[in-house]
Image (cartoon, rainbow, N blue to C red):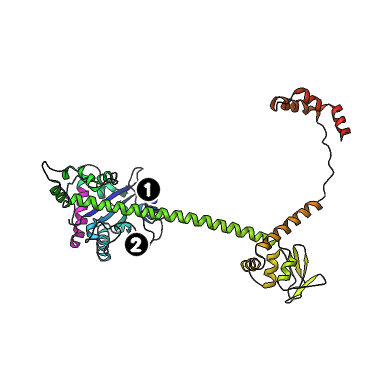
């Protein structure tokens, strides 16, 4: 079966459509079927790094008239060839192709776009991260005569005139690829992209089952099974279905690998978050280590309530310290700051040093020291003596109603508790 040209066009009627298509083609949007290890290439428009939407707006702004509300602002053209061209030895091996053949096709397609549309073709992206190489080209359908954008004038609209223009477009592209041995599909063929979509709905079936639904490949009366199989295996429709099945299987495998990578990444993210939280917890604990213990591990000696050594004269007051040496004269708070000051290291190095010297036992001591510090602060904090609140008599009916109606307490019991006599008895009991 000879390789065939593939050309489709799609209308982009809003700038939102343009931006959405741009995100997909440039892979700014997650594409499960795409292989992230492969790089795509820009054939046209590589010097302009702006978003496609901005480029299209700039093109349209040069026209005399603003586009109508239903006008096509940009036309996306999809160009490719059937798998037989890219992998002639085995078209069913999706995701692989001859680089030499691919480059020849890409150059011929790029030259055809430039020759037919010139500066109106603002971008062409070569995709190599899917099962078969293909090109997404963007053409702004400017009509200089009318001063408007007109997709119909360039590509044809609905009806017979539109079909004629589209057929001529297919002829033109096929002529450009003819030197490569790529042929045009059958003119007037009823096969459409919709047929491919219908076909993909049955991809879970065996190839033979899908073939039987095609009337052209149905068995003839009194045809033997062996002759029937031989006939359909040599039929180009059967070959096309097999290639599509292979492409679909390849994309499903790639999607499964992408989902697995996503699950692995999510697991690694959770593990990293857990390690970060643990490190933060350990950091806070190490910060609260008793400074006297840290000073001792740093090699300082206590002399008259000051820790000396290595050119430092440090006074420690609970969690604060101050260096009185003439060269330093600097203070700080916490074990981490003390290590950074004496060792002359950064924050991460100080954490590593403390973890190495004190470990889990030191972290426990730090937690105990921190608890004692907080408890001491709470104990030393002055507290006013307890005073009974002054009764607000106008509020009592509402309180009694809540206790009896909402909480279900007997009214007599509530009234008994409220009487001054009961309060006096309670006071004597105390």
Q: Would you place residue 337 above or below residue 380 in this image?
A: below
| Residue in the foreground of this view, choosing between 337 and 298 | 298
Identify the image quadrant of residue 314. bottom right
Pointer 1 and pointer 2: residues touching (CB < 8 Å)? Answer: no
Q: Which residue is at 69% across, 59% downward?
A: 364
Q: Which residue is at 87% across, 33% downward?
A: 429
Q: Position of residue 304 (x, y in %)?
A: 83, 72
Q: Which image quarter is the N terminus in? A: bottom left
Look at the image and say whether residue 43 sits in the magenta stretch. Answer: no
Identify the image quadrant of residue 198. top left
Q: Name the residue tied to disc 2.
A: 41
Secondary structure, mark 1, is helix
| Residue in the foreground of this view, choosing between 97 and 206 | 206
| Label 2: few (<14), some (14–19) or many (≥20) C-alpha neighbours in 10 Å | some
Q: Which residue lies furthest to the right in this view?
A: 428
| Label 1: few (<14), some (14–19) or many (≥20) C-alpha neighbours in 10 Å | some
Q: Which image quarter is the C terminus in? A: top right
Q: Position of residue 49 (x, y in %)?
A: 40, 60
User: Range of the magenta residues?
Assistant: 164-186
Secondary structure, mark 2, is strand
Q: Earlier in the sequence, mark 1 or mark 2?
A: 1
Q: Position of residue 113 (x, y in %)?
A: 27, 58
Q: Position of residue 23 (x, y in %)?
A: 40, 53
Q: Would you place residue 400 above or below residue 212 in this image?
A: above
Q: Main secondary structure of the magenta part?
A: helix
Horizontal relation, residue 311 to residue 186: left or right:
right
Q: How many labels does the image show?
A: 2
Horizontal relation, residue 388 to residue 73: left or right:
right
Q: Name the residue tied to disc 1.
A: 17
């Amino acid at each position: 079966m000879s390789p065939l040209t593939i050309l489709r066009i799609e209308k982009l009627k809003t700038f939102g459509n343009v931006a959405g298509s741009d995100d997909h083609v440039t892979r700014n949007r997650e594409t499960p079927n795409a292989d992230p290890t492969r790089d795509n290439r820009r054939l046209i428009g590589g010097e302009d790094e702006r978003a496609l939407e901005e480029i299209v707006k700039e093109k349209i702004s040069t026209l005399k008239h603003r586009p109508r509300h239903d006008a096509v602002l940009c036309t996306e053209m999809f160009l490719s060839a059937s798998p037989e061209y890219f992998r002639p030895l085995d078209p069913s091996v999706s995701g692989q192709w001859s680089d030499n053949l691919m480059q020849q096709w890409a150059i011929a397609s790029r030259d055809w776009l430039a020759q037919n549309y010139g500066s109106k073709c603002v971008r062409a992206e070569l995709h190599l991260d899917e099962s078969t190489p293909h090109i997404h080209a963007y053409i702004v359908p400017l009509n200089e005569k009318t001063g408007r954008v007109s997709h119909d004038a360039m590509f044809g609209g609905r009806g017979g005139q539109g079909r004629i223009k589209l057929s001529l477009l297919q002829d033109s592209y096929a002529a450009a690829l003819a030197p490569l041995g790529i042929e045009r599909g059958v003119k007037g063929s009823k096969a459409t992209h919709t047929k491919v979509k219908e076909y993909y709905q049955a991809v879970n079936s065996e190839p033979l089952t899908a073939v039987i639904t095609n009337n052209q490949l149905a068995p003839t009366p009194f045809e033997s099974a062996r002759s029937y199989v031989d006939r359909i295996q040599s039929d180009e429709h059967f070959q096309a279905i097999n290639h599509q099945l292979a492409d679909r299987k390849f994309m499903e495998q790639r999607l499964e690998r992408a989902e697995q990578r996503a699950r692995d990444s999510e697991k690694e993210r959770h593990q990293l978050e857990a390690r970060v939280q643990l490190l933060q917890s350990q950091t806070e604990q190490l910060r609260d280590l008793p400074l006297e213990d840290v000073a001792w591990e740093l090699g300082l000696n206590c002399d008259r309530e000051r820790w000396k050594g290595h050119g430092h004269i440090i006074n420690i007051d609970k969690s604060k310290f101050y260096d009185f040496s003439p060269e330093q004269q600097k203070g700080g708070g916490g074990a981490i700051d003390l290590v950074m000051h004496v060792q002359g290291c950064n924050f991460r190095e100080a954490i590593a040093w403390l973890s190495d010297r004190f470990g889990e036992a030191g972290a426990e001591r730090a937690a105990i020291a921190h608890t004692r510090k907080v408890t001491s602060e709470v104990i030393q904090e002055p507290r006013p003596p307890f005073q009974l609140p002054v009764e607000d008599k106008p509020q009592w009916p509402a309180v009694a109603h809540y206790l009896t109606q909402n909480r279900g307490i007997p009214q007599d019991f509530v009234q008994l508790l409220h009487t001054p006599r009961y309060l006096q008895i309670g006071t004597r009991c105390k």
